[in-house]
Image (tube, rainbow, N blue to C red):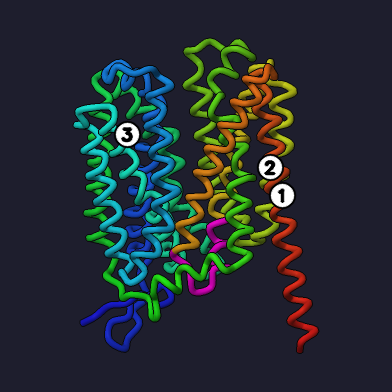
Amino acid sequence: MTMAEVDGAVRVGKTAVPRSRLAVALIELALAVGSFGIGTGEFAIMGLLPNLAQEFGVTTPEAGYAISAYALGVVVGAPIIAVLAAKLARQTLLLILMAVFAVGNVVSAIAPSFESFVLVRFLTGLPHGAYFGVAALVAASLVPPNKRTQAVARVMLGLTVATLIGTPVATWFGQAMSWRIAFAAVGVMGALTVALIWLFLPKDRVQEGATPLRELGAFKRKQVWFTLGIGAVGFGGLFSVFSYIASTATQVAHIPESIVPVMMALFGSGMIVGNLVGAWFADKALIATIAGTLVGSIVVMSVLSLTAENPYMLSACVFLVGCSVAIGPALQTRLMDVAADAQTLAAALNHSAFNIANALGAWLGGLAIASGYGFASTGWVGALLAVGGLVVLGLSVASDQRRLRLAVSNG
């Protein structure tokens, strides 16, 4: 008997068998474990750079090239994999992506030289965007249309929990024992995800009519570009603040260095709250949630710059900046709405956009600091980036309205 995923059900022969809540929960859990592993692997290295630098005999800034290499892998890998894998079933593709991720982290743990380590980090980043994109499509297909964003958010929950639990734990183990152990552990998480997907996600058929050419059609859709632009620009503010939060806390608010992990935990807690609450609102009013998140980011990041010297205000703002991650699942759902039959490529590109936001936010924040405006200025940079995202959203909505008016006038 063949099984295929149809409208949140498993079709066996000619009979559609709805999935139980338990079956859906197990699939979401399997996908969330993968996002937890990816999040831990992506962010833990930031706390291990001094250890890497010492072992490989390079400076800490040079060790940072490994972070850039991974991010470049995400940006490059997402569209290429989505197009080349157009004729693969989603379960098969997810298994391959997580297997590559698992192997990449294990090889990272045994890399003999800095050059080989940077190369392996680039290769390990390749499946990142495609995994999240396909996982989001699978999660959305398991639930009614009016609950899609919440399903996507539950998968993304693994990524946000990684910032609160996975990254600190991996960093601690890496510092106490060896950074190699941290990457080996992330590799084990990847292998566990492969096993869980194999066990809980039913084998599906290749989407009818799926071809690389059809996926490339996403690049012809103006609304896809607008949505990616919102993420690439508007989400950059979070990274502008997050990249320098430790220095802002210790040098501006004069918070003891021992309290910095508490600030990081506040940020991670905000990400979890924003991910879940924002998804609930997005399923009620998608565009309004995206706009509201951007407006909220403008306000919070401006307040952060004005009050960063106050430890309590800074703590509150850090939590609220983390909440701005609410825009992630909302933009993922928006892409599902505007990508038509090029779903896989559009969904994968969302994470390329977020990594562009990461690079853009960190770069502009660093530029402001280097220009003498101080660490608190990263909030102003973030606010301006959120304004940019709001402008792109306005252009997107205006374009949609023009299209609708033309459709009505043409009868």
Identify the residue under disc 3. 118
Q: Nearer the viewer, residue 251 or 316?
A: 251
| Secondary structure of the residue carrying numbered label 1 | helix
| Camera sees residue 312 | no
Residue at the spot x=65%, y=29% of the render?
A: 317
Q: Main secondary structure of the magenta part?
A: helix
Q: CA distance from mark 3 to mark 1?
A: 35 Å
Front position among marks 3 and 2: 3
Amino acid type at image mark 2: Ala
Q: Residues within 10 Å of mark 2 (few under 14, many from 20)?
A: many
Please tell me which of labels 3 and 2 falls first in the chain.
Answer: 3
* Residue 162 horizontal/vertical position (percent): 40, 38
The quarter of the picture where the N terminus appears is: bottom left
Is 396 above or below relative to 387? below
The quarter of the picture where the C terminus appears is: bottom right
* Residue 270 horizontal/vertical position (percent): 56, 37
- Please say if the residues under marks 3 and 1 sit with CB atoms less than 8 Å apart: no
Q: Nearer the viewer, residue 3 or 217?
A: 217
| Secondary structure of the residue carrying numbered label 2 | helix
Asked if the stretch drawn in magenta spans residue 333, the answer is yes
Identify the residue under disc 1. 390
Identify the residue under disc 2. 386
| Secondary structure of the residue carrying numbered label 3 | helix
Is 44 above or below relative to 294? above
